[in-house]
Image: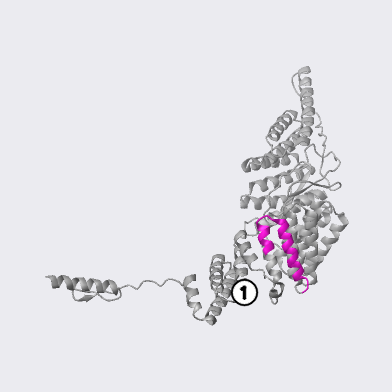
Amino acid sequence: MALEESSVLEAELARQSDPGRPEASGGQKRKQRKAPRDPPSERRLVEEAQEDPLRRQAEIEGLTAAGHQALVRGHKKEALSSFRKAFALSSETPRHGTQRVCAFNLGAAYVEAGRPEKGLALLLKAQPEEEGEAAGECLGDLFFNIGVAHEGLGDFGQALEAFRKAQGHYCAVQTESEAGTRMRMGDCYLGMGDPWRASQCFLEAGRSYAGAGRLELAATALSEATRLMLRSQEHEDGEVVKVLNECRELCEQIPDRALLGKLYNDIGLSFSELKIFSLAAESFAKALSFCKMEDGEEDRPTDEDAAAAAILQNLGATHNALGSFSTAVGFHQRAASLHSGLGNRRAQGQCFGNLAYALSQMGDHEAAVENYLHALQAFKDSGDLRGQWQSCEGLAGLRFHLGDPEKAVASYKEALMLISKCQDAPETAAQERIVNKLAEALQSKLSVSSRVLQGSGILTSRPARHFPMSQTFAASSLHRKKETFPPAACHASLPDNGATGCRPWRRRLMRWPHGAMGHFNGGEMWLLRPLA
């Protein structure tokens, strides 16, 4: 019995010591599953590489190449894994240059992955201890990435210092890299609230790119430069027009249709701010021609409809400014239809407001009232208080013009109530304007009531008197409104032509393809800028 137990125990110990050994049971052998092999760890790689320096160097080069390929494919986690293993191997090599290169690659990958703090620590380790050690290394790229890391941490001053160092290393050999560095410096100045210096950086970058034959990058940089020049309000209009013309000349040589659509849309926005509406309309028309829409299918929602809706909306607003209302109506309707398909109620409300103003100027006041009501409902659906009170003001003006002071009074009161809820951006001037209009509407209402009481109780018809507009739409006196980035706005006013008593409807033009949908004011045309 003891021998049997001993044999069993020995068999069990043998099975535990050799898991791969088959176990007999009932004359049959059981197959054992092999445990999956774990991928080599960083420690194991180091131990294996210590045995052979050549193998270690080959491993580092292979991992570095794999990391770069992963970054190109957009696989940031995979890239970080490869660079970490290469950095661990480099710690065992006596070659300091290899260690710095691996630290640089890993640090740059961390910055690319959105972890600038960790990346910065590694990038600082990659700096050569002595100037002589830098021979053969691209210090421009090192300082550029250090600058990007500081920028990501919000340290714009230190980022600028690093970019300047990178620029010093680039200027002698790499014009394109120098231009790219200037653009990042522009971003830093913009983060510091200095659009003038930012515009200069983008302007220099654009001209450097143009000199290097990189037309797409040159046009993009010049377009951004004009936007910032307008924002800073420290440049003469002639200077801005000169840069815009440079950008237009570059666009004629660019084959990328998608980029051209964006560039021409941005050029049109800048011309709008300069009150050059004819060139703005021309630019928007060119932008629309680069949209991928099939003939007769503009109203069917597609992937390109966001861009098309923005341009159509801009075209409509620009033709309103030019007084081409019959042309503008078609653009407003198409833009509203596209926004409806996209589910963008706020932008759709703006299109209805633009359409209402155009119709009122054409004398179709009933249709204008209907579109103001559509705009009001769209703004209620999207929770836009400012759009709501502007719709009410437009409705009140039309109703007063149509001889219904009672409804005009109700709409003005509703507009004042909605303005009082706009605590974030007080509308003192608009409030005073509406109060004055309300007072006149009340006076007219009392006058009508008095005539009814004095007569037989039947209100006789009388010609509708148009309501005097305090601020009307025009292309003649445009000035930019100061407000926070990214939106930039401009106002316009035109002497009353007596066509209607409603407030003119101006809407914010849209940046490509999605911008912060802007409000519109009775005398404002808003430009939509792209979000960062």
Is 155 colored magenta in this rendering? yes
State which quarter of the image contains the C terminus: bottom right
Residue appearing at x 61%, y 50% in the figure: 343
Whether residue 93 can be seen here: yes
Q: How many marks?
A: 1
**Residue at the spot x=58%, y=74% of the render?**
64
Q: Which image quarter: residue 97?
A: bottom right
Q: Which of 316 and 491 is in front in this view?
A: 491
Q: Where is residue 291 in the image (x, y as percent from the top left)?
A: 69, 62
Indicate the position of residue 449 as horizontal and vertical percent values.
76, 22
Q: Is residue 386 magenta?
A: no
Residue 343 or residue 362, whichever sits in front? 343
Where is 471 relative to 94, above or below? above
Is residue 128 rendered to the left or right of residue 494?
A: left
Main SS, magenta region, reads helix
* Mark 1 Cα-neighbour bin, 10 Å: few <14, some 14–19, many ≥20: some
Question: Please, which residue is most extreme toward the left here?
Answer: 1
Residue at point 59% right, 69% down? Answer: 71
Residue ID for mark 1: 96
Task: Please give the range of residues in magenta.
Answer: 146-172
Q: In which quarter of the image is the N terminus?
A: bottom left
For the residue marked with disc 1, what is the amino acid? His
Q: Give the secondary structure at mark 1.
A: helix
Question: Is the residue 438 above or below the residue 174 in the image?
Answer: above
Where residue 217 sits, quadrant-wise, is bottom right
Q: Where's residue 476, x and y in %? A: 86, 47
